[in-house]
Image (spheres, rainbow, N blue to C red):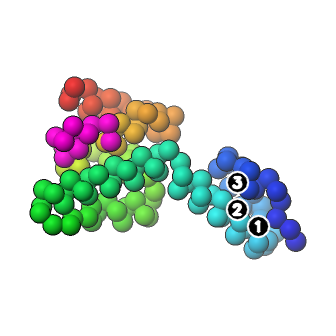
């Protein structure tokens, strides 16, 4: 059985999910594999994923400078690998208090890299509460 051409061109995650469910129902392992790889590619290359990885890299760089040794975000990295950027960002911006990562980035004049800034730039991907809390938190620093 061959793999449909539309999969390689599709950027719509909902459509790909439907195709994946259909392939699973028909036990078409080849299509399941190809759609799974396409979904993974789209998620890894989305603007939110790229912005989150950039933020995480800069945060760890600043943390390492602050601590005088290589330091990783030991709680954030596993959460990111388990849940992805959108879930992590939503979680972080909804916390009642500013995170150490937010504070470190802001203290180094990098508020534009914070999760809150990512939310503001991609409002359609986040809850109204996350958007509201991000706007509020960012307004307090400018």
Which is more toward the observer, 103 or 86?
103
Query: Can you identify the residue that label 1 sits on?
Result: 31
Q: Distance between the residues labelled 2 and 3?
A: 7 Å
Which one is earlier in the sequence, the residue at label 3 or at label 1? 3
The structure residue drawn at horizontal position 11% and vertical position 63%, both measured from the top left corner, is 68
Q: Distance between the residues labelled 2 and 1?
A: 6 Å
| Magenta-highlighted residues | 103-113
The structure residue drawn at horizontal position 19% and vertical position 42%, both measured from the top left corner, is 108
Quarter in which the C terminus is drawn? top left
Task: Tell me residue 73's x, y (percent).
Answer: 27, 61
User: As displayed, is residue 114 above or below residue 41?
Assistant: above
Q: How far apart are marks 3 and 1 (CA)?
A: 11 Å
The structure residue drawn at horizontal position 43% and vertical position 52%, both measured from the top left corner, is 85
User: As displayed, is residue 137 above or below residue 115?
Assistant: above
Which one is earlier in the sequence, the residue at label 2 or at label 3? 3
Q: Main secondary structure of the magenta part?
A: helix
The answer to whether residue 18 shows anywhere in this view is no
Please tell me in which quadrant of the rendered image residue 8 appears.
Answer: bottom right
- Any magenta on residue 58? no
Task: Tell me residue 105's x, y (percent).
Answer: 23, 44
Q: Could you tell me if the residues under marks 2 and 1 are in contact, i.e. CB atoms within 8 Å?
A: yes
The answer to whether residue 134 shows anywhere in this view is yes
Relative to 103, 49 lies left or right:
right
- Any magenta on residue 105? yes
Q: Residue 16 carries which label?
A: 3
Q: Which mark is residue 53?
A: none
């Amino acid at each position: 059985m061959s793999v449909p051409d539309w999969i390689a061109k599709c950027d719509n995650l909902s459509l790909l999910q439907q195709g994946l469910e259909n392939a699973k129902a028909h036990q078409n392992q080849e299509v399941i594999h190809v759609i799974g790889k396409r979904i993974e590619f789209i998620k890894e290359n989305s603007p939110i994923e790229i912005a989150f990885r950039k933020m995480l890299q800069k945060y760890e760089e600043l943390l390492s400078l602050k601590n005088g040794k290589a330091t990783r975000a030991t709680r954030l990295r596993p959460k990111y690998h388990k849940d992805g950027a959108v879930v992590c960002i939503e979680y972080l911006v909804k916390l009642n208090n500013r995170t150490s990562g937010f504070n470190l980035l802001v203290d180094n004049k990098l508020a534009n890299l914070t999760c809150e800034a990512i939310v503001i730039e991609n409002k359609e991907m986040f809850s109204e509460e996350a958007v509201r809390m991000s706007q509020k938190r960012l307004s307090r620093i400018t």
